[in-house]
Image (spheres, helix red, strand yellow):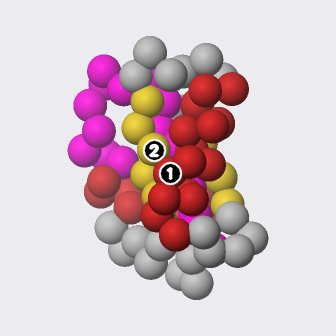
Amino acid sequence: MNCVVIPAFRAAGSILQVIAAIGPEVELIVVVDDCCPEGTGLTVTNRCSDPRVVVLVHNANQGVGGAFMTGLRYAVRRGRV
């Protein structure tokens, strides 16, 4: 199974284009809003209709590594990795 984890911080203006560029070979796209002041996760939730996308939101910024690990743990629990 193929999965992409996207740590997102201050990416509201570009995140939808990033998601749109991901090919059909990817089965799961996990966007992790790392306590983004722009609300990147909310942008994805409200404006992205791709059924492969799951949005997770941190209540405190954990950095790119922490956001990636959150997404990876989610994918592993779902049997996607």
Q: Position of residue 78 (x, y in %)?
A: 66, 23
Q: Is residue 15 left or right of residue 63?
A: left
- Alpha carbon of mark 1 to alpha carbon of mark 2: how far? 6 Å
Q: Residues within 10 Å of mark 1 (few under 14, many from 20)?
A: many
Q: Position of residue 48 (x, y in %)?
A: 49, 50
- Residue closer to the observer: 27 or 59: 59
Residue drawn where x is 55% and y is 39% of the image: 72
Mark 2: secondary structure:
strand
In contact (CB < 8 Å): disc 1 and disc 2: yes
Mark 1: secondary structure:
helix
Identity of the amino acid at label 1? Phe
Write down the region rendered in magenta: 19-35
Q: Is residue 60 left or right of residue 29?
A: right
Identity of the amino acid at label 2? Val
> Relative to 81, does residue 38 appear above or below in the rendering?
below
Mark number for residue 68?
A: 1
Residue 16 among those drawn in magenta: no
Q: Which residue is mark 2?
A: 5
